[in-house]
Image: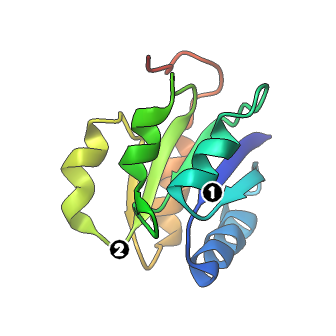
Amino acid sequence: MIKAVIIEDEEKGLNNLKSLLGKYCEQVSVIGEAVSVESGLKLLSKPGFTPYVAFFDINLPDGLVFQLLNQLSSITFDIIFVTAYEKFAVKACQYSSIGFIIKPIDPDELKEAVSRIRKGNAHKIN
């Protein structure tokens, strides 16, 4: 099972992503959700909390998700951005993301991104 976190501020977007993961990526189990930079930072900073992948919306109510990533001491999970903003694609590459999916989500793009998830810490960024 691939443990996943979703950080998405729109309930409709969150529910849609969870539905698509359940339908097309049954190996993914969502173990945490957050709706902002602040709540995402709290979630990802919990001791012993170790997702394999995080699905990030970029534009959150209290800032850009990049602010959250910059505050983490290390990133030990793969990153898949799910956003309506193509203009952040280059910035997303700076965080070694394994996927950049434009909303509305194409199930084939989601399956392709999920297929690139690496279990373990081989992708750890300090």
Residue 39 image point, x, y percent: 63, 54
The relative height of residue 66 versus residue 95 in the rendered view (above or below) is below
Q: Which residue is mark 1?
A: 6
Residue 111 image point, x, y percent: 55, 57
Badge 1 amino acid: Ile
The relative height of residue 90 versus residue 122 in the rendered view (above or below) is below
Left/right placement of residue 76 relative to residue 63 reads right
Residue 74 image point, x, y percent: 51, 22
Image coloring type: rainbow
Say which element carries label 2.
loop
Badge 2 amino acid: Ala
Q: Residue at x 66, y 50 (%)?
A: 5
The image quadrant where one finds the C terminus is: top left
Q: Which residue is mark 2?
A: 84
The image quadrant where one finds the N terminus is: top right
Left/right placement of residue 24 relative to residue 110 reads right
- Residue 116 in view (yes/no): no
Residue 67 is tagged as none
Left/right placement of residue 5 relative to residue 59 reads right
- Please report whichever mark, 1 or 2, sits nearer to the chain's N-terminal start: 1
**111 vs 100, nearest the viewer:** 100
Q: Residue at x 51, y 54 (%)?
A: 37
Q: Residue at x 51, y 23 (%)?
A: 73
